[in-house]
Image (cartoon, rainbow, N blue to C red):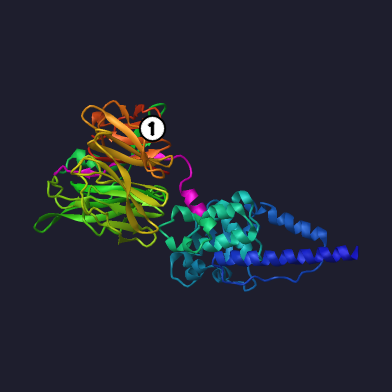
């Protein structure tokens, strides 16, 4: 029995040591400067321990003012602190030792100091009571269901401390709360997630894409040289809202610039929308195009400016691969004039690092003895990603063949994937869309009489069966999700969904603005 008692005592002392470290971590997270006063471990009367525990857990302080009064041995000046539902009477000097906020308040000439009344109505009374219990009595007891409310004040400065505390306490709820905060501001505070364990970084990305993706749309190019209601209405980001069986488009936010002419390409990375390109703005001698890039966070509904492209590009493709954005092709962005026979596709390829907010050049397109045709109905050349590689599809100007180029992002090198798709195999002078689904490239194009869908297996380097469907005019930048392609059309300001298995078309409600040259993508809100 004596040995058993010794084991119990050692176990209890170990628990107290663990609890002490945890409370000291909480102290650091809450910016408390005063050290905790610890009593020597000793055998105590069980009834006294039980009584103390009952007082700690009770809500007597809500109805008894005496339990909301906190004095200290120094008998310093008392202040009244008004929180959300209750008023507390607190020793200001002691509170100043525990909190930088109250320290600054005690040395200031603010009205709160002279009147001995501090208004903190935005702070929940339960949270402030827990703070006082910890500051004056070194007690910390917060029920799990109130943990999130106590952590509302998560900030850039304290979140990593809370994350360490969650690991020490093995608290899944606390960890999820901190990770949710970090994921919400992933690229706003990139230094916070830089040193996290790999599995936590994966969890941050999962949390950013939690829920149901929403189909979104914006006008990526506008050529109207005037400011009118139509242009103002088109300068918005739209989201498809579920409304019964039909749904409707609603405006999420205005685009982050004011111009009558613009040309952008979109890319979605880590559930951030990137708007990359430029717009026309007035200068002393008229107008010129300004390169600009923006990043939209759907979780905060905020736009920020990011680094612009190095090259002035128009109608270029953007693809996301291996956590980077690649800008491919396009031609010179100047006055948005129609390209002529002398206009060629840019061979320079740029790569964007979202953590560093920088662009750099990588290996150029291998357009040495041929050129890709240009188009005003889609980006040139069409580009997508699969695995760790980029894939580019274009019409060879001389022959009309369809050629696939592959860029290995790890080796920084290009290669041609033969065979080409010849005109004898498919009369496909117009290309609308290139995407990836089921480890294959999906190609949609057409001619004057019909629209055709085919595929290309990158492993076997073989073209799939050519399938024809009714003539459908598709323009702009589309997206693919769950074997369905989403693109805009010219008819009735429509956005359509094309099932890749059945080739059936499903129209969505008309956009609130006329379709011109739209980009479609999915975001999690």
* Foreground residue among 191 and 54: 191
Residue behind mark 1? 500
> Looking at the image, which residue sits at the far left?
285
**Quadrant in the picture for residue 353:** bottom left
Q: Is residue 2 left or right of residue 79?
A: right
Badge 1: residue crowd in 10 Å (few <14, some 14–19, many ≥20):
some
Residue 192 lies in the magenta-colored region:
no
Residue drawn where x is 34% and y is 27% of the image: 505
Image quarter (top left, top right, bottom left or bottom right) of the C terminus: top left
> Total number of numbered labels?
1
Q: Is residue 114 visible?
A: yes
Q: Secondary structure at mark 1?
A: loop
Residue drawn where x is 61% and y is 48% of the image: 145
- Tell me if residue 102 comes above or below residue 404 in the rendering: below
- Tell me if residue 48 comes above or below residue 315 in the rendering: below
> Looking at the image, which residue sits at the far right?
1
**Image spot of residue 32 (x, y percent):** 56, 68
**Quadrant in the picture for residue 507:** top left
**Image spot of residue 424 (x, y percent):** 25, 34
Image quarter (top left, top right, bottom left or bottom right) of the N terminus: bottom right
* Foreground residue among 182 and 26: 182
Q: Is residue 98 left or right of residue 514?
A: right
Q: Point out the stretch of residues depicted in magenta.
A: 202-225
Q: Is residue 125 visible?
A: no
**Image spot of residue 346 (x, y percent):** 22, 53
* Foreground residue among 447 and 298: 447
Q: Is residue 338 left or right of residue 394?
A: left
Residue 219 lies in the magenta-colored region:
yes
């Amino acid at each position: 029995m004596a040995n058993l008692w010794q084991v119990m005592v050692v176990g209890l002392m170990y628990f107290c040591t663990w609890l002490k470290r945890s409370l000291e971590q909480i102290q650091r997270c809450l910016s408390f400067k005063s050290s905790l006063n610890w009593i020597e471990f000793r055998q105590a009367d069980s009834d006294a321990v039980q009584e103390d525990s009952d007082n700690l857990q009770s809500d007597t302080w809500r109805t008894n003012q005496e339990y909301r009064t906190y004095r200290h041995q120094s008998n310093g000046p008392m202040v009244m602190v008004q929180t959300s539902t209750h008023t507390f009477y607190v020793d200001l000097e002691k509170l100043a030792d525990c909190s930088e906020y109250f320290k600054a308040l005690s040395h200031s000439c603010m009205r709160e100091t002279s009147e001995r009344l501090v208004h903190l109505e935005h702070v929940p009374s339960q949270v402030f009571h827990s703070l006082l219990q910890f500051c004056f009595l070194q007690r910390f007891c917060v029920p799990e269901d109130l943990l999130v409310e106590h952590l509302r004040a998560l900030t850039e400065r304290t979140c990593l401390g809370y994350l360490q505390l969650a690991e020490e306490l093995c608290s899944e709820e606390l960890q999820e709360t901190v990770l949710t905060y970090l994921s919400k501001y992933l690229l706003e505070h990139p230094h916070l997630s830089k040193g996290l364990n790999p599995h936590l970084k994966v969890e941050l990305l999962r949390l950013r894409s939690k829920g149901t993706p929403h189909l979104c749309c914006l006008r990526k190019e506008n050529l109207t040289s005037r400011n009118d209601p139509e242009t103002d209405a088109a300068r918005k980001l739209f989201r498809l809202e579920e409304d019964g069986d039909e749904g409707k488009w609603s405006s999420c936010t205005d685009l982050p610039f004011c111009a009558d002419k613009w040309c952008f390409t979109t890319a979605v990375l880590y559930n951030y929308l990137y708007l990359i390109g430029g717009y026309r703005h007035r200068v002393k001698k008229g107008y010129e195009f300004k390169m600009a890039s923006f990043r939209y966070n759907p979780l905060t509904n905020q736009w920020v400016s990011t680094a612009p492209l190095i090259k002035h590009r128009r109608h270029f493709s953007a693809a996301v691969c291996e956590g980077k954005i690649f800008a491919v092709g396009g031609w010179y962005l100047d006055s948005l004039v129609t390209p002529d026979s002398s206009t060629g596709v840019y061979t320079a390829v740029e790569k964007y690092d979202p953590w560093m907010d920088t662009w750099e050049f990588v290996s150029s397109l291998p357009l040495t003895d041929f050129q890709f045709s240009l188009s005003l109905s889609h980006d040139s050349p069409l580009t997508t990603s699969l695995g760790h590689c980029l894939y580019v599809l274009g019409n060879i100007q001389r022959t009309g063949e369809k050629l696939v180029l592959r860029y290995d992002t790890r080796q920084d090198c290009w290669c041609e994937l033969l065979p080409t798709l010849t005109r004898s195999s498919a009369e496909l002078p117009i290309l609308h869309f290139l995407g990836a689904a089921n480890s294959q490239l999906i190609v949609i194009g057409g001619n004057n009489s019909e629209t055709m869908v085919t595929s290309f297996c990158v492993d076997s380097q073989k073209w799939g069966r050519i399938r024809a469907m009714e003539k459908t005019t598709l323009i702009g930048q589309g997206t693919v999700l769950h074997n369905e392609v989403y693109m805009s059309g010219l008819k009735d300001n429509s956005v359509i969904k094309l099932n890749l298995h059945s080739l059936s078309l499903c129209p969505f409600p008309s956009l609130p603005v006329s379709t011109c040259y739209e980009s479609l993508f999915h975001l999690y809100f």
